[in-house]
Image (cartoon, helix red, strand yellow):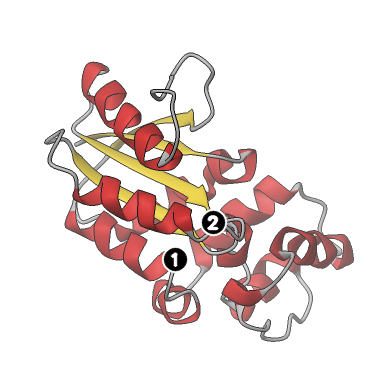
Amino acid sequence: MKVLIVSEGKHERCGAIQALVTRLATNDLALDYDRVSRPDIHAHHGKGRGYYKRALRWLFEAAKRGHDALVLVIDEDGRSERVEQINQAQKTELNPLRRAFGVAIRTFDAWMLADEEALTEVLGLQVQRQSDPERERDPKGVCKDLLDSSPRPMSQSQMYAAVADRTSIQRLEERCPRGFAPFAGRVRAL
């Protein structure tokens, strides 16, 4: 199955989202990547439902490029309307292309905080269980602080890819029930 993965940040696109999608998938996937905010992929202008429009535009773009499915992940960033808009786009029948849309609560970085055992293994230091990842005010900052404490030299993107490759999917679903769990179910359904 040929799948287009579209996400916001460089940390997701540098292997982390690939690792999660590949681990969740039940089929072999051929993956291509792009970023949500490409200036040449325009959503229709006008008021309201901006992320619904953007997701719908990416559905048509993925179909035009010959993909069988689209995986799209954005950050909630404290804006709850994004969740509803992405859920509407997930359900729309305006385009038949298969899809798995997700909204990381608050940000994708929170998903990296869900499994202290994976963090300990990747960072080479004892990491305690983090507070509720979806309620963390600055998950990117927490991840950066953990990385800065690590004796292992790596970029934040490398850290995310390694954590995503090792994290317990079950633990991630349990600790990020509003963002990751629905997304995981949608990827499995592809």
**Callout 1, which amino acid?**
Gly
Frontmost of labels 1 and 2 is 2
- In the picture of the structure, the residue carrying the numbered disc 1 is 179
* Secondary structure at numbered mark 2: loop
Q: Residue at x 41, y 75 (%)?
A: 173
* Picture mark count: 2
Q: Nearer the viewer, residue 96 or 163?
A: 96
**Callout 2, which amino acid?**
Glu
The answer to whether 133 appears left or right of 1 in the picture is right
Q: CA distance from mark 1 to mark 2?
A: 9 Å
The answer to whether 157 appears left or right of 5 in the picture is right
- In the picture of the structure, the residue carrying the numbered disc 2 is 76
Residue 58 image-quadrant placement: top left
Residue 160 image-quadrant placement: bottom right
Task: Relative to 81, say whether 69 is above or below.
Answer: above
Q: Position of residue 161 (x, y in %)?
A: 58, 52
